[in-house]
């Protein structure tokens, strides 16, 4: 945590007016909930004008977090996920030992129940392909 705090301290001195922070360089949900909670709390402590903390979220890491974990993260100030759906192909998901698209689309709705907003995006795939079909399984407004 020392290195992270040092970077936050530096950034808060250079950019004291910061209102939004995106936890970049990977999926922060990969971290244990306790550690991620401490990081978010420290961000709000150091950036006094902070309004929103957001993070990328891979579906597999989101699925590993319990509802209690998501509630804790929201409580300390994680307000948005950028949820990447790399593929909607059930065949590819199965070959990667991931969840099939129907189940995946059901679970990506979980942040909404904890008041965490999220954006769903896909880096590839056509508008007619399986990724688009899985994104369309998520009701509008979530």
Image: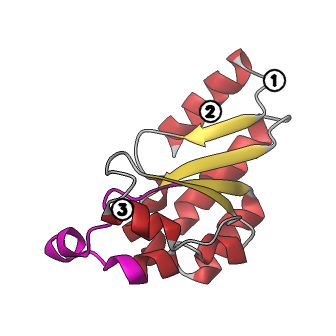
Is label 3 or label 2 in front?
3
Instruction: State the mark number for residue 17.
Output: 1
Instruction: State the mark number for residue 8.
Output: 2
Is label 2 or label 1 in front?
1
Residue 109 horizontal side relative to residue 131, left or right: right
Q: Marks 2 and 3: in contact by CB < 8 Å?
A: no
Q: Position of residue 4 (x, y in %)?
A: 52, 39
Question: Which residue: 36% across, 76% down?
Answer: 101
| Numbered disc 3: secondary structure | helix
Q: CA distance from mark 2 to mark 1?
A: 13 Å
Residue 85 horizontal side relative to residue 110, left or right: left
Q: CA distance from mark 3 to mark 2?
A: 36 Å
**Which residue is labeled 3 in the image?**
131
* Sequence-first disc among 3 and 1: 1
Q: Position of residue 85 (x, y in %)?
A: 40, 59
Instruction: State the mark number for residue 91.
Output: none
Q: Quadrant of residue 119?
A: bottom right
Q: Quadrant of residue 23?
A: top right
Residue 6 counted in the magenta span: no
Q: Position of residue 106 (x, y in %)?
A: 50, 81
What span is in magenta? Answer: 83-102
Q: CA distance from mark 3 to mark 1?
A: 38 Å
Residue 83 horizontal side relative to residue 85, left or right: right
Question: Which residue: 62% across, 22% down?
Answer: 10
* Sequence-first disc among 2 and 1: 2
Question: Which residue: 85% across, 36% down?
Answer: 48
């Amino acid at each position: 945590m020392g290195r992270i705090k040092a970077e936050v301290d530096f950034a808060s001195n250079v950019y004291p007016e910061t209102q939004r922070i995106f936890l970049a360089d990977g999926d922060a949900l990969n971290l244990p909930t306790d550690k991620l909670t401490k990081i978010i709390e420290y961000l709000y402590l150091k950036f006094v004008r902070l309004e929103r903390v957001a993070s990328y979220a891979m579906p597999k890491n989101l699925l590993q977090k319990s509802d209690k974990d998501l509630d804790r993260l929201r409580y300390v100030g994680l307000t948005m996920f950028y949820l990447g759906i790399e593929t909607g192909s059930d065949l590819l998901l199965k070959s990667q030992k991931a969840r099939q698209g129907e189940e995946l689309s059901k679970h990506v709705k979980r942040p909404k129940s904890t008041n965490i907003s999220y954006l769903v995006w896909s880096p590839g795939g056509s508008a007619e392909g399986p990724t688009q079909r899985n994104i369309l399984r998520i009701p509008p407004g979530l």
